[in-house]
């Protein structure tokens, strides 16, 4: 698919080209794809923004963004890449701007391409602009494919997709008027991280682990996303969302879907997304008593952050015990934890196996010490770690802990890991939806999260100090 699409003329429209996401992620990722030869040869990238820039000013802006990349690649490649960019000024709610955008696309097709082009629309804008952009795209006719074997149209949408089940469904219905499901690419960039993709390969390519991947052998699973940063300049936005909506409803549940899914029929995006959604639909949490299954916290000083309400009860930390109601994982708790201003920045999945029934060790040794654990390090230091136990050398029968570890950085074939956005953009151009969330996944995730959000307002909000591990379950 990629080989075919690198020869097909394509127009990519980035709404919000001057925003942080474009500057920090999209433009660098597109340039790295260009350097790797993974972009279509006939490509035009239209930047859409409200700024009244001339073409020279816009190209100067893009060149400035790529300045850091110029140290890695020769200047000729930068200049070649810059020729792919065109600017279209307009407001997201201005119908006239979409007409100008349409005229610009037609001029590119008739001029440089001499044929109808693929269209890829990227909404690199805050979520409150989604609905307006969807409507204007629908009214303008810009999302109508050329037809036949050429000229597909696709749309890329960032998370969060809605604020609850109701708003997510409303956006989906509106989006469904424009595109079919196979044209919609909802981004959760965590799914594109190399170490997380490797999780599926590890699970289903090694007969050593699949037979024990069930409740008979697995005791519990920890899925953790901890950050050392505070909310910083995102105070106003974060205070209206909270940690559970910000990363729990998407990143952590997607990781849970991968670790708990059944073997897919094949490696297609359709088959893998089908198995992920089955896990999310089977999720349930204990709500009575809620305190045994849910904990929420707020770091000390959060209320003094810029844009945060002085009486805020928004959580900056949460821990949720979830269960998958199926035969494979019945009774196994999945502990989802995330927080800001913590002592360590890491994302990992730790699978804890049950201790053996007959342990060759001294009775005085603590039972829980003999758990085998399998850790998937998503970031930083991407890799896999297996903890096991051996007899300590000498005359005693004491056990000692050892590790088998794999690190991407330390492997003999170590290369630069592609950024998540490089993979997402390449897959969107190729039409591969494996790393993108489906309508069913989004709705299933909200259905699990909403009862918790409604119920835990009556639970205490634990204040924790910055730089610590955050609150912990008492039970």
Image: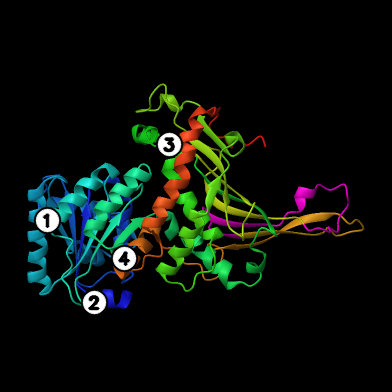
Relative to 232, does residue 203 appear above or below in the rendering? Answer: below
Q: Earlier in the sequence, mark 4 or mark 3?
A: 4
Of residue 5 and residue 244, the one placed in the foreground of this image is: 244
Boundaries of the magenta span: 356-384
Determine which residue is flagged by label 4: 182
Q: Residue at x 31, y 72 (%)?
A: 37
Question: Based on the displayed image, in which of its 4 quarters is residue 290 positioned?
Answer: top right
Of residue 471 and residue 406, the one placed in the foreground of this image is: 471
Is 447 in the magenta?
A: no
Question: Based on the displayed image, in which of its 4 quarters is residue 273 positioned?
Answer: bottom left
Q: Tag on residue 50?
A: none
Q: Nearer the viewer, mark 3 or mark 2?
A: 3
Relative to 258, does residue 40 appear above or below in the rendering? Answer: below
Q: CA distance from mark 3 to mark 2?
A: 44 Å
Q: CA distance from mark 3 to mark 1?
A: 36 Å
Determine which residue is flagged by label 3: 242
Decide if residue 265 is on the left or right side of residue 423: right
Determine which residue is flagged by label 1: 140
Q: Secondary structure at mark 3?
A: loop
Q: Residues within 10 Å of mark 2 (few under 14, many from 20)?
A: few
Q: Residue at x 34, y 32 (%)?
A: 236
Q: Earlier in the sequence, mark 3 or mark 2?
A: 2
Q: Pinpoint residue 255: horizontal percent, then vertical percent.
A: 50, 55
Q: CA distance from mark 2 to mark 4?
A: 21 Å
Q: Secondary structure at mark 4?
A: helix
């Amino acid at each position: 698919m990629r080989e075919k699409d690198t020869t097909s003329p394509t127009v990519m429209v980035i709404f919000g080209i001057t925003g942080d996401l474009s500057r920090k992620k999209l433009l660098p990722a597109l340039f790295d794809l260009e350097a790797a030869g993974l972009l279509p040869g006939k490509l035009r990238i239209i930047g859409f923004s409200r700024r009244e820039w001339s073409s020279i000013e816009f190209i100067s802006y893009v060149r400035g963004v790529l300045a850091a990349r110029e140290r890695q690649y020769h200047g000729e490649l930068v200049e070649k890449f810059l020729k792919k960019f065109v600017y279209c000024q307009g407001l997201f709610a201005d119908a006239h701007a979409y007409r100008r955008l349409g005229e610009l696309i037609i001029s590119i097709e008739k001029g440089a391409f001499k044929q109808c082009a693929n269209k890829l629309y990227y909404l690199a804008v805050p979520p409150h602009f989604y609905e307006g952009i969807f409507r204007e795209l629908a009214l303008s006719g810009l999302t109508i494919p050329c037809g036949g074997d050429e000229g597909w149209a696709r749309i890329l949408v960032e998370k969060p997709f809605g604020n609850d089940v109701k708003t997510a469904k409303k956006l989906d219905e509106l989006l469904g008027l424009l595109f079919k499901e196979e044209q919609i690419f909802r981004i959760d960039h965590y799914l594109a991280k190399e170490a997380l993709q490797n999780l599926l390969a590890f699970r289903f390519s090694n007969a050593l682990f699949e037979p024990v991947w069930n409740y008979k052998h697995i005791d519990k699973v920890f899925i953790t996303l901890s950050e050392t940063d505070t909310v910083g300049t995102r105070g106003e936005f974060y205070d209206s969302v909270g940690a559970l909506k910000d990363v729990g409803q998407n990143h952590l549940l997607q990781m849970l879907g991968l670790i708990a899914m059944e073997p897919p029929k094949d490696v297609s995006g359709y088959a893998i997304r089908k198995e992920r959604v089955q896990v999310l639909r089977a999720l349930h949490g204990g709500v009575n008593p809620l305190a045994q299954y849910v904990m929420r916290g707020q770091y000390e000083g959060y209320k003094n952050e810029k844009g945060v309400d002085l009486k805020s009860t928004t959580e900056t930390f949460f821990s949720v015990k979830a269960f998958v109601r199926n035969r494979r994982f019945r009774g196994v708790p999945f502990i989802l934890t995330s927080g800001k201003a913590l002592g360590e920045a890491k994302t990992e999945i730790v699978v804890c196996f049950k201790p053996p029934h007959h342990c060759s060790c001294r009775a005085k040794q603590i039972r829980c010490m003999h758990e085998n654990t399998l850790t998937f390090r998503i970031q930083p230091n991407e890799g896999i770690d297996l903890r096991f136990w051996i007899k300590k050398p000498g005359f005693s029968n004491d056990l000692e802990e050892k590790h088998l570890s794999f690190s991407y950085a330390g492997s003999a074939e170590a290369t630069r890991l592609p950024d998540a956005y490089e993979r997402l953009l390449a897959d969107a151009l190729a039409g591969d939806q494996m790393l993108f969330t489906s309508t069913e996944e989004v709705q299933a995730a909200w259905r699990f999260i909403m009862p918790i959000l409604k119920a835990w307002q009556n639970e205490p909000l634990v204040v924790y100090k910055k730089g610590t591990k955050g609150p912990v379950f008492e039970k």
